[in-house]
Amino acid sequence: MITGIPVSEGIGIGKAVIVKKEYSIKRYSVDNTETEIERFIEAIDKAKKEISDIKKHAEQNLGSDKAMIFDAHLLILDDPEFVKMVKEKIQQGTNAEWAVDESAKFYESLLLSLDDEYMRERASDIKDVSKRLIRILSDESHSEAGLKNLAEGSIIVAEDLTPSETAQMDKTRVAGFVTQQGGKTSHTAIIARTYEIPAIVGVKGALEKIKDGDVVIVDGYQGTVLINPDKQTLEEYEKRMNEEKKKKEELKRFVATEVKTKDGKRIKVYANIALPDEAEIAIKNGAEGIGLFRTEFLFMNRSSPPSEDEQFAAYKAVLEKMEGKPVIIRTLDVGGDKNIPYLNIENELNPFLGYRAIRLCLGHRELFKTQLKALLRASVYGDLKIMFPMITTAGELKEAKSILQEAKEELKKQGIEFSEKIEIGIMIETPAAALVSDILADEVDFFSIGTNDLIQYTLAIDRTNEKVSYLYDPLNPAVLRLIKMTVENAHKKGKEVGVCGEIASDEKIVPILIGLGVDELSANPAKVLSVKKKITETDYSTEKNKVNEYLQIS
Ligand code: PEP
Ligand code: MG
C-alpha cells in the first residue's frame, strides 16, 4: 500500500495505465545553427496550432475557464526570455530538442524553488509545452494518442498530468488518478473533482511501485493506493464501491427536486464552493444555488491580488454556470488561519480574534472596492447576492455598504452596467452579531450562519487547535440558542436565514437546524443530495417541539 493526499473522494478500482514522461532526447551538434533555429521556430508555430485546437476542444467540452489553461501555454511559446534562451543554446551548436529541454528544465526548477504553491504548479505548464515542442521536433508519437483510447476502468498513474493530457482523455473510462506530484489545486485534482473521479496526488514512488496493467484500488477517502490486492481485500472494496454507486444512484432522484419536510415545510438546499469550476459539481449534485462562494481561494497561492477583470471573469463564470439560480458570493475572508503573504498581515498572537475578514477589508479599501466592482459588473449575468463575513457591529456593516455604494457610483460614472437588485447579506459568525441580529436584520436582505466560526467564538475554542477540539460541540445549547435567536430576529423582519457552516452537511444535525427554523442549508457539493433526502424524511413540527430539549441539555 502507498499513500498520498486525497483530493477527490470515492473508491476507484481498475487496471493501471502508466503515463510515462520519458523522451529519448538526443544531443548532437549542429553546424548550421540558422537552419536549426528555423526548425525551432517552425516547431513553435506547429505547437501553437495544436494548442489552439486542443483549446477549442476543451472549450466545447470543459467550458471556457478550463480552456484558459491553454492560453498560459500559448504565452510560454511567445515568451521572449524562453525563446531567447533556446536560441542561444542552439547558437552554441546544440540541436533544438536539447536546447528546448535544457531551457525548460531551467524554468521548471526556478518555479519549483519558489515558496508559492501556485507558481510551483505552473512548472507543469512549462513541462507540457516543452514536451510538445520536443515531440514535434523529433517527430515522436505522443502519449495523448494512448489517452484517447483508454480501456474502461483505467487507473491513470503519472508523475503529474498536464492539462492537454486530461483534456483529451475520455474521462468516462477513468476509474481513478494517482500522481506523484500535485496539490489540492493542481490540474489533476480540479479535473478529478469536477468529474467525481477518485484521485490521490503526491504519492511518492507510485511510478516505481505500480506497473502497467496492475490491479489498483484508489481510496479517495483515505488517500491510500492498494496494488494487486488479495482476493478478500478486492471483494471488500468492490462491495463498498458498489454500495456507494447504488446510494449515489438512489439519491439522483433528488437532483431536480425542490425538497420539503414530511409536513410540507420548504427548505432550500444550496452548495458551498471555493473555485468557479466547482459550480459544475454543485449543479450536477442538485444544488438549487450557491450558498457560499469562498472567494479567498482566488487570492491565494499567488504573489499579488487578482485584478478586477480577473475577478469579474471568475464571478461571471459561476453566475453563468448557475443559470439564474441564486449565487451568494462572500467578500474576501482572509486572516485567521488563511494567510496571504502579499497583504503583509503582521503575525498576531490571536489571529482569529484579530485583523481578519471584514476588518481587513475595511482597512484595505481599494482591495475591497476592486472586489465589489468586479462583483457588481458580474451581477448582470445571474442572481448575485453579496455577503460580508465576520460582522460584529452594525457600524462595520454600514461602512461595508457605503464602500459598496462608492463602487456603484464609480461604475455609473464609467457607464458600466450592474444589476439594481443585488441582495446584501451578512454571515452571522460571532456571538455579538447573533445577539444584535434584530438590529442587523434591518440593514440586510438575508443572514447566513457561519457555524464553523460561531461555534469557535461562542465556546472560546480555536477551531484549529487539536488540544481543545473535544470541546467543539455544534450542539452545545449556547450555540443553538444563538442560532434560534438569529432565526427569530430575522423572521420578525421578514428576512431569510441560511446555515453555511459544515454542520449543514451533517445529516444528523440537519433535523435540528430545521427544528430551529432555518430556511436554507448550504452544504458541501458532495453532500447536497443526502441533505435533500434527509429533509424529506424529517418532520418539521416534531423537530420544532424537540428544540427546547436541545436548548437545555449540554
Ligand atoms: C463558517 O465560519 O461557518 C464559514 C462557513 O466560514 P469559513 O469556514 O470559511 O470561516
Ligand atoms: Mg467563517
Image: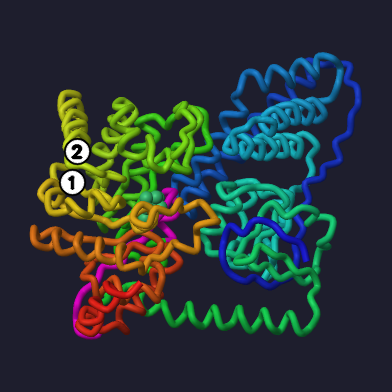
Find residue 427 and report its horizontal and vertical position in percent: 28, 51
* Location of residue 551 (image quadrant): bottom left
Find residue 237 and report its horizontal and vertical position in percent: 67, 79
Find residue 197 and report its horizontal and vertical position in percent: 58, 64
Give the magenta part as a residue range.
Answer: 261-281
Residue 165: which numbered mark, if any?
none
Q: Nearer the viewer, residue 98 or 368?
A: 368
* Residue 306 appears in the figure: yes
Of the 4 image quadrants, the one containing the N terminus is bottom right
Q: Helix, strand, or loop for circle 2?
A: loop
Task: Indicate whether residue 505 is drawn in magenta.
Answer: no
- Report which residue position mark 2 lands on: 418
* Badge 2 residue CB within 8 Å of ligand 1: no
Give neighbour class at mark 1: few <14, some 14-19, many 20+ (Cα, 10 Å).
some
In the figure, is residue 13 to the left or right of 399?
A: right
Of the 4 image quadrants, the one containing the C terminus is bottom left
Residue 76 in the image: above or below residue 539: above
- Evaluate if marks 2 and 1 touch, with contact meaning CB atoms under 8 Å apart: yes
Q: CA distance from mark 2 to mark 1?
A: 9 Å
* Location of residue 488 (image quadrant): bottom left
Residue extending furthest right? 28
Q: Amino acid at mark 2?
A: Phe
- Report which residue position mark 1 lands on: 422
Q: Amino acid at mark 1?
A: Ile
Task: Indicate whether residue 270 is drawn in magenta.
Answer: yes
